[in-house]
Amino acid sequence: MQQSVFSKVNKGAAIEVFALIRACAKDTSPNKADLSAGTYRTNEGKPWVLPVVRKTEIKITSDETINHEYLPVLGECKKHCEHTYIHTDVCILNFHSYILL
């Protein structure tokens, strides 16, 4: 069998959150609560969604103004940053001479 081109690649460091999840899984305490990955389970081990998350999902999916269009390359944040920099009480930036990255 031919050796993989990746056989000489060094193993990366463990991702800490996954180490925490494994440690929690090994913990035998009946009082443990695994909150490490932001996913929650009932005492029976079934997935449980926080009520506020479920309520927000329903609100978002009911909003007919939301579509599946791509966001601008720089995201929605850019226009809010521009507004913050340009519309301050003491504006030190000339409207025509600024660059936001």
Image (tube, helix red, strand yellow):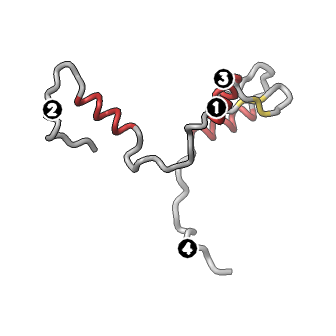
Q: Earlier in the sequence, mark 2 or mark 1?
A: 1
Q: Residue at x 46, y 47 (%)?
A: 71
Crowd class of label 3 (few under 14; some 14 to 19; many from 20; radius 10 Å): few
Name the quadrant containing residue 66: top right
Q: Which residue is mark 1?
A: 38
Of badges 4 and 2, nearer the viewer stands 2
Crowd class of label 2 (few under 14; some 14 to 19; many from 20; radius 10 Å): few
Q: Which residue is mark 4?
A: 5
Q: Earlier in the sequence, mark 4 or mark 2?
A: 4
User: Distance from label 4 to label 2 (Cα)?
Assistant: 53 Å
Image position of 72 with respect to 66: above or below: below
Q: Which mark is residue 52?
A: 3
Q: Which type of secondary structure does the marked residue at label 3 adopt?
A: helix
Q: Which residue is mark 2?
A: 93
Q: Residue at x 66, y 23 (%)?
A: 52
* Residue 64 image offset from top left, x and y in percent: 60, 37
Amino acid at dot 3: Val
Query: Seen from this angle, which residue lies furthest right?
Result: 44
Amino acid at dot 4: Val
User: Distance from label 3 to label 4 (Cα)?
Assistant: 47 Å
Do the CB atoms of the residues marked 2 and 3 lie less than 8 Å apart?
A: no
Do the CB atoms of the residues marked 4 and 2 lie less than 8 Å apart?
A: no
Of badges 2 and 1, nearer the viewer stands 2
Q: Which type of secondary structure does the marked residue at label 1 adopt?
A: loop
Amino acid at dot 2: Leu
Crowd class of label 1 (few under 14; some 14 to 19; many from 20; radius 10 Å): few
Q: Earlier in the sequence, mark 3 or mark 1?
A: 1
* Residue 17 image offset from top left, x and y in percent: 59, 37
Q: Earlier in the sequence, mark 2 or mark 3?
A: 3
Q: Residue at x 74, y 34 (%)?
A: 25
The residue closer to the viewer here, 74 or 60, is 60
